[in-house]
Amino acid sequence: MSSDVVQFINHLSIEKGLSKNTISSYRRDLSNFQIFLNKEEIAPGDLNTNILNSYLAHLRKENIAEASIARAVVVLRNFARFCEKEGGIPSLLKDFEPPRVPKRLPKALPIETINRIIDSVSIDDAIGLRDRTILELLYSTGARISELVELKVRDLSNLIEQQTLKLFGKGNKERVVPVGSMASKSLEDYLVRSRPMLLKGKRGEALFLNSRGEKISRQIVWQIIQERSAKAGVNEHLSPHTFRHSFATHLIDGGADIRVVQELLGHANVTTTQIYTLVTLDKVRESYFAAHPRAK
């Protein structure tokens, strides 16, 4: 199975152009399934529906989230279909249906809370200015954390003239997004006052740097959000995606066309973006029942 996995991973990387993080998830899901088969002494050719259901029960026993279980099933199914297409033995896996996961509405912060978190960050030192710029950019562009940490200085070539920058999303797909005036100002200040101090005479292309002058990591961005929000008195569990959700929700609340929001978020399918309309509809419904005299 290992040589098939290698071929499958190469197929995902080269032909499908999937991101490193997605490929890493695929590899992990396949490895976990192989460990389960080895532990239960089951040969791949002996798979049946009972064994597959036992694997799902095993994952639930390990407290794996339903969304992660559904993804693991999709990975196994795609792998089986790839193997069959490449001349392998047909497997039950190719028709294995993932469990249905109820739609979770994305969590968006109120505009006042976003402003409070960003405005609370002091820009008197290099780290503070960097952190504030990261928060400004996450909310101004709706960038994924992977897109933010991979930003290079050259991706800002049109920042001053057009107030745009380039983001490279899933599958390394490029998109150009506008940058609001506050985020643009913060970026310009960061490039002039903060980044050279963090760089410490080194050479580097990465836009955002850690204290050693190296490309910032996803973990540090998570830490920045946790620490800065806590200092602002926001004690909820926030993530980089909270800023992305807030970006999309506030745009739709403000009347932005859903196709425009789809483009800005880098969604391949508009149905992915439409979940934000459910959030807005939820607010409309809540306001209606709270305000209408015959609805209470």
Image (spheres, grey):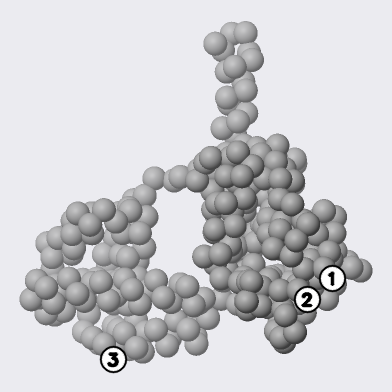
Looking at the picture, how far across and down is residue 192, in whole percent? Answer: 84, 70
Asked if labels 3 and 2 touch by Cβ distance under 8 angstroms, the answer is no
Asked if labels 1 and 2 touch by Cβ distance under 8 angstroms, the answer is yes
Q: Residue at x 71, y 58 (%)?
A: 128
Quarter of the image that includes the N terminus: bottom left
The amino acid type found where label 3 is placed reads: Ser
Asked if labels 3 and 1 touch by Cβ distance under 8 angstroms, the answer is no
Please name the residue that numbered disc 1 is placed on. Answer: 192
Q: Give the CA distance from mark 2 to mark 1.
A: 7 Å
Please name the residue that numbered disc 3 is placed on. Answer: 3
Q: Is residue 48 above or below residue 237?
A: below
Check disc 2 and report its element: helix, strand or loop: helix
Looking at the picture, how far across and down is residue 243, in whole percent? Answer: 62, 51
The amino acid type found where label 2 is placed reads: Pro
Please name the residue that numbered disc 2 is placed on. Answer: 196
Q: Give the CA distance from mark 1 to mark 3.
A: 50 Å
1 or 3: mark nearer the eye? 1
How many C-alpha atoms fall within 10 Å of the one at disc 1: few (<14), some, or many (≥20)? Answer: few
| Relative side of 171 to 263, left or right | left
Q: Is residue 173 above or below residue 254?
A: below
Check disc 1 and report its element: helix, strand or loop: helix
Q: Residue at x 44, y 46 (%)?
A: 103
